Image: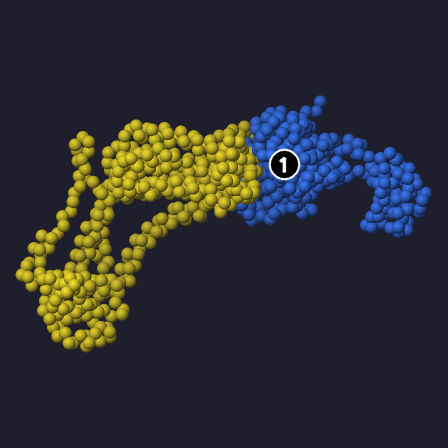
Chain colours: A yellow, B blue
C-alpha cells in the first residue's frame, strides 16, 4: 500500500485553494487582464499627450480681421502671442481642482512645453467690401482665417432687435484643425471684449481683476472645534473609489468562481473531485482560493490608489484604521458574492442559465452604486443607515459611509453592521453549501428560485 | 472467514418520487473482483455514489473497508462513468493534484506519476495539457488518477467505454494486475461478456434491488444450460423445423451464421436425451450443449422487466 498520510479536511481544502489560485493568477488571461492591461492603459494615456504634441504642426500664418474700428486686430495679436497662449494653458491647468494636488504647476509646465510653435501675424482691414477677395485667400490657404467683426458687436450693448447676443464670423480653410480653429475663435472673442472695454474707457486689466472669482478654502470644523482643510473632489471621489475597489476585487473573483464551477460541472471533472473531497470541502477550497485572487487584486489596485493619494499629498485621507475596516468589510463582501456565485454555478449547466439566476442578486448588489450620491452626501442620513443593515449590500454601503463621512460613523452602527453582517455571512455559507452539495450532481434543466429553496431545506 | 470490503444494509435512496435504490443488502468480499451489472437506470451508479459517499443514503448503512464511507474515502479509487479532466491542466500536475487530494505526501509523487505513465504507455504526455490528449489517452489518464494512490478498494464504472481494442486490453491487464496484487475491485458495466471475462463474482441490480449475488461458478451451476446447438450435415435451414418436433424442444431457431439450429429445451427434459434424439434423426456435423453466458442469465432475470427509457434516471 502507498505511504499514505491522513488527508485531513484542511489539507484537502488548501490543496484545492492552491490549485484554484495558481490556475487563475498564473495565467496569461489574468496577468494580461488584471496586471498588464491597467499599466498599458496608464502608459497609453501618458503617451497620447506626447503623440498629440508630436502630431501638432507649428501654427504659422496670417489671420485677417475685417474691422471698421481697427482696434480688434491689435488685441487679437496680443492673445495669439506664443507666451500668452502658453500662459493661458498653464492657468487653466493650475485652476483644475482635480489636478491641483498632483503638482498642477509641473503638469502645466510639462503640457505647455509640448505645445506647437505659434507664430500668427494678425492684420486688419477696415474695408468690408474686400470680403470676397479675402475669402478667396482663405480658400487657397494664404490666410489662416478671416474674422468679420461688425461695429455693432463692439457696442456697449451688443444685442440684436430681439435681444439676442450678436455674433462675429470666423472663416477658416477646410484643413484647419479643430484645435487651431478653437485658438483663433477664443483669441478674437477675447479681443472683441477688450476692444469694447477700451471703447467705454475702462482699463481691461483692472476690470479683469475686479471680476476674477475668488477660490474657496473650505475648512471643515470637527466636534472638538478643530478645523481641517477639505479637498472636496477627493472627498467625493474617495468613497466611490473605495467602493469600486471592493466591487472589482469581489466580483472579478466571483465571476471566476461562477465560470470554473460551471466548467467543472460541464467537463464532468466534478464527480472525480467529489470522489476525493466532500462538496463542502470543495466549496471551501474554491472560496479560499479565489479570496486570495481577490486579495491580490485588492492589494495591487489599493496600493496604486494609495500611492496616488500620497503623491498628491492626500495620504492623510487614508488611515491604517480605515484600511483595516476596508479589509474586514472586504471579507464580508467577498463571502456574500462568492457563495452566491458558487451556488449558482453549481446549479446550472452553462453561463446562459446562470444569468437568469444571478440577475436578481446583481440588481440588489448594484444598489450601493445607485445610492452613491445620497449616501456620500449624507453618510449619516436615513438612507445610508437603513442600507447599512441590509445583506448583502452591508459592506459596500458601510465602506461608502466610512470614507465619505467627515465625522466617525456611530460606533454602535459599525459594531452592529459587523455582527449582523457576519451573522448573515454564516447564513450565506450554510445555504450556499447546501445548494452546492445538491447542485454539483444535478444535470438537466436548471432549478427555479423556488427549487433552490427546496434544495436548502432538503440537503 | 471472508471479510467484506463493502457492506450495505437495507439501503434506500430516493430522488423526489423516484426510488433509485430500494432496500439493498450486499457484501463485496475483500480481494474479490465483483461485477455490478444491470440495465441502464437500475441503480448501479447511485449505489456506487453512496459507497463513495458522494451522496448519502436516505435509510440504511454503508460500511466501506471497515469504516464509514467518508472515513474510507482516501483508501478508495474511483473511476466514474462520466469522466472529466481539467482541460488546461498539464497531465503530471493533474495526477499529482489528485494524489495529493487522496493523501499522498509530496515527496516521491513525481516518481509515482512517471511509473504509472510508463505502465499506460503515456510517458510523453506528462507535460502536455489534458485537452491535447486523444479521447483514449484521456481515459487512460483518468484510470491512472483513480489508482495512483494505491487504493485498497477500486471502483470502476464502465472502464472500457470508448477505448479501442488495444487500450481496452491494456486496461484489462492492469485491472487483473491490481486484482492479483490483492486489491478489491468493483467493476460496473452493462457489457456482459466483459464482466464474465474479468469478474469472480456478480451482483445484478434491477429497479433498485439486488436480484442476483453469486460467484461465477455458482452462477454457472445455478443456471443450467438449456440450449442445444445442432449443425446438420446438409446445412439445410429446413432441418430446424424437423428438429423442432423432437420431444422436449420448446423452440427451434435457425442460426444462419453458424449453419446450425438452436433448440431451447423445456425445463423438465434432459438436454442429453434431446441431443441423442437429434443424432438419431439426421446426419449431423456437430451437436453441442451451449454453456450459459452471463448474457443468458441477464436476459432470464431481467428479461421483460427492463425499465423503459423514461424510467431510467440516476444510473
Is B33 on the left or on the right of A351, as rendered?
Answer: right
Side of A161 relative to B68 (left or right): left
- Regarding residue A146, the answer to whether it shows in the image is yes
Apparent side of residue A172 relative to residue B99 in the rendered image (left or right) = left
Q: Residue at x 26, y 65 (%)?
A: A177
Image vertical order of residue B291 relative to residue A64, above or below:
above
Q: Nearer the viewer, residue A76 or A313?
A: A76
Q: Nearer the viewer, residue B241 or A217?
A: B241
Farthest right residue in view: B280
Q: Residue furthest left?
A: A201
Q: Position of residue A183 (x, y in %)?
A: 20, 62
Q: Residue extending furthest top?
A: B1
Instruction: Please identify the quadrant where the N terminus of chain B is shown.
Output: top right
Compare residues B256 and A302 and report the one nearer the observer: B256
Residue drawn at 13 percent across, 65 percent down: A153
Q: Residue at x 47, y 34 (%)?
A: A432
Dividing the picture into quarters, in which one does residue A192 lie?
Answer: bottom left
Q: Residue A106: in sight, yes or no?
A: no
Instruction: Name the spot of residue B224 as percent of width and height, x first.
Output: 82, 35
Secondary structure under the numbered disc 1 in the rendered image = helix
As drawn, which residue projects farthest toward the front?
A162
Which quarter of the picture shows residue A4?
top right
The C terminus of chain B lies in which quarter of the figure?
A: top right
Residue B117 figure quarter: top right
Instruction: Tell me which chain the residue with mark 1 is part of.
Output: B
Circle 1 residue: B45
Q: Residue at x 34, y 40 (%)?
A: A368
Crowd class of label 1 (few under 14; some 14 to 19; many from 20; radius 10 Å): many
Q: Position of residue B300 (x, y in %)?
A: 77, 37
Count of marks overlaid on the render: 1
Amino acid at each position: 500500500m502507498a505511504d499514505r498520510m491522513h488527508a485531513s479536511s484542511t489539507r484537502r481544502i488548501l490543496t484545492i485553494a492552491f490549485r484554484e489560485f495558481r490556475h487563475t493568477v498564473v495565467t496569461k488571461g489574468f496577468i494580461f487582464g488584471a496586471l498588464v492591461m491597467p499599466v498599458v492603459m496608464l502608459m497609453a494615456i501618458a503617451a497620447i499627450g506626447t503623440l498629440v504634441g508630436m502630431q501638432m504642426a507649428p501654427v504659422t500664418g496670417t489671420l485677417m480681421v475685417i474691422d471698421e474700428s481697427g482696434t480688434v486686430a491689435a488685441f487679437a495679436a496680443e492673445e495669439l502671442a506664443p507666451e500668452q497662449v502658453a500662459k493661458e494653458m498653464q492657468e487653466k491647468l493650475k485652476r483644475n481642482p482635480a489636478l491641483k494636488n498632483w503638482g498642477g504647476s509641473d503638469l502645466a509646465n510639462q503640457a505647455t512645453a509640448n505645445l506647437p510653435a505659434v507664430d500668427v501675424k494678425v492684420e486688419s482691414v477696415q474695408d468690408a467690401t474686400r470680403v470676397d477677395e479675402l475669402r478667396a485667400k482663405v480658400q487657397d490657404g494664404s490666410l489662416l482665417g478671416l474674422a468679420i467683426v461688425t461695429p455693432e458687436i463692439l457696442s456697449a450693448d451688443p444685442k440684436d432687435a430681439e435681444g439676442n447676443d450678436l455674433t462675429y464670423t470666423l472663416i477658416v480653410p477646410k484643413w484647419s484643425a479643430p484645435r487651431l480653429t478653437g485658438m483663433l475663435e477664443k483669441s478674437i472673442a477675447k479681443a472683441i471684449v477688450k476692444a469694447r472695454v477700451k471703447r467705454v474707457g475702462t482699463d481691461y486689466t483692472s476690470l479683469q481683476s475686479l471680476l476674477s472669482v475668488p477660490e474657496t478654502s473650505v475648512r471643515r470644523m470637527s466636534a472638538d472645534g478643530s478645523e481641517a482643510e477639505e479637498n472636496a473632489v477627493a472627498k467625493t471621489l474617495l468613497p466611490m473609489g473605495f467602493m469600486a475597489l471592493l466591487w472589482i476585487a469581489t466580483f472579478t473573483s466571483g465571476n471566476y468562481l461562477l465560470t470554473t464551477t460551471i466548467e467543472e460541472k460541464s467537463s464532468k471533472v466534478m464527480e472525480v473531485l467529489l470522489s476525493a473531497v466532500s462538496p463542502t470541502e470543495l466549496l471551501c477550497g474554491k472560496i479560499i482560493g479565489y479570496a486570495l485572487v481577490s486579495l491580490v487584486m485588492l492589494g495591487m489596485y489599493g496600493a496604486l490608489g494609495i500611492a496616488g493619494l500620497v503623491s498628491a499629498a492626500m495620504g492623510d485621507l487614508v488611515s491604517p484604521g480605515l484600511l483595516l475596516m476596508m479589509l474586514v468589510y472586504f471579507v464580508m463582501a467577498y463571502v456574500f458574492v462568492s457563495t452566491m456565485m458558487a451556488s449558482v454555478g453549481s446549479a446550472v449547466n452553462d453561463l446562459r442559465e446562470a444569468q437568469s439566476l444571478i440577475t436578481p442578486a446583481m440588481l440588489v448588489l448594484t444598489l450601493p452604486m445607485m445610492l452613491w450620491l445620497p449616501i456620500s452626501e449624507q453618510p449619516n442620513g436615513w438612507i445610508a443607515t437603513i442600507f447599512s443593515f441590509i445583506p448583502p449590500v452591508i459592506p459596500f454601503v458601510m465602506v461608502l459611509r466610512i470614507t465619505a463621512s467627515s465625522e466617525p460613523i456611530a460606533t454602535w452602527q459599525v459594531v452592529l453592521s459587523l455582527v449582523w453582517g457576519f451573522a448573515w455571512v454564516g447564513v450565506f455559507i450554510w445555504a450556499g453549501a447546501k445548494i452546492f452539495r445538491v447542485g454539483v450532481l444535478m444535470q438537466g434543466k436548471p432549478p427555479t428560485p423556488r427549487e433552490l429553496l427546496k434544495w436548502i431545506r432538503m440537503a | 472467514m471472508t471479510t467484506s470490503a463493502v457492506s450495505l444494509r437495507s439501503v434506500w435512496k430516493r430522488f423526489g418520487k423516484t426510488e433509485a435504490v430500494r432496500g439493498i443488502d450486499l457484501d463485496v468480499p475483500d480481494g474479490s473482483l465483483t461485477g455490478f451489472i444491470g440495465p441502464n437506470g437500475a441503480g448501479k451508479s447511485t449505489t456506487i455514489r453512496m459507497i463513495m459517499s458522494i451522496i448519502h443514503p436516505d435509510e440504511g448503512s454503508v460500511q466501506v473497508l471497515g469504516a464509514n464511507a467518508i472515513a474510507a474515502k482516501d483508501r478508495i479509487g474511483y473511476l466514474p462513468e462520466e469522466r472529466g479532466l481539467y482541460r488546461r491542466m498539464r497531465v503530471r500536475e493533474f495526477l499529482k493534484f489528485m494524489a495529493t487530494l487522496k493523501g499522498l505526501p509530496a515527496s516521491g509523487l513525481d516518481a509515482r506519476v512517471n511509473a504509472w505513465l510508463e505502465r499506460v504507455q503515456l510517458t510523453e504526455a506528462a507535460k502536455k495539457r489534458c485537452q491535447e490528449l486523444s479521447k483514449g489517452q484521456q481515459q487512460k489518464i483518468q484510470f491512472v488518477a483513480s489508482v495512483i494512490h494505491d487504493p485498497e478498494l477500486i471502483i470502476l464504472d464502465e472502464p472500457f467505454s470508448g477505448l479501442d481494442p488495444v487500450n481496452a486490453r491494456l486496461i484489462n491487464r492492469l485491472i487483473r494486475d491490481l486484482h492479483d496484487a490483492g486489491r478489491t475491485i468493483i467493476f460496473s458495466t452493462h457489457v456482459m461478456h466483459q464482466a464474465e471475462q474479468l469478474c469472480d463474482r456478480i451482483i445484478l441490480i434491477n429497479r433498485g434491488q439486488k436480484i442476483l449475488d453469486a460467484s461465477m461458478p455458482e452462477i454457472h451451476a445455478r443456471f443450467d444450460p438449456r440450449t442445444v446447438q445442432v449443425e446438420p450435415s446438409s446445412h439445410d435451414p429446413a432441418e430446424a423445423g424437423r428438429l423442432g418436433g423432437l420431444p422436449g424442444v420448446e423452440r427451434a431457431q435457425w442460426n444462419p451464421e453458424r449453419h446450425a439450429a438452436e433448440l431451447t429445451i423445456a425445463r423438465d427434459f434432459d438436454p442429453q436425451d434431446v441431443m441423442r434424439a437429434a443424432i438419431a434423426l439426421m446426419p449431423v456435423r456437430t451437436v453441442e450443449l451451449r454453456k450459459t453466458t452471463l448474457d443468458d442469465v441477464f436476459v432470464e432475470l431481467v428479461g421483460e422487466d427492463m425499465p423503459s427509457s423514461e424510467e431510467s434516471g440516476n444510473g
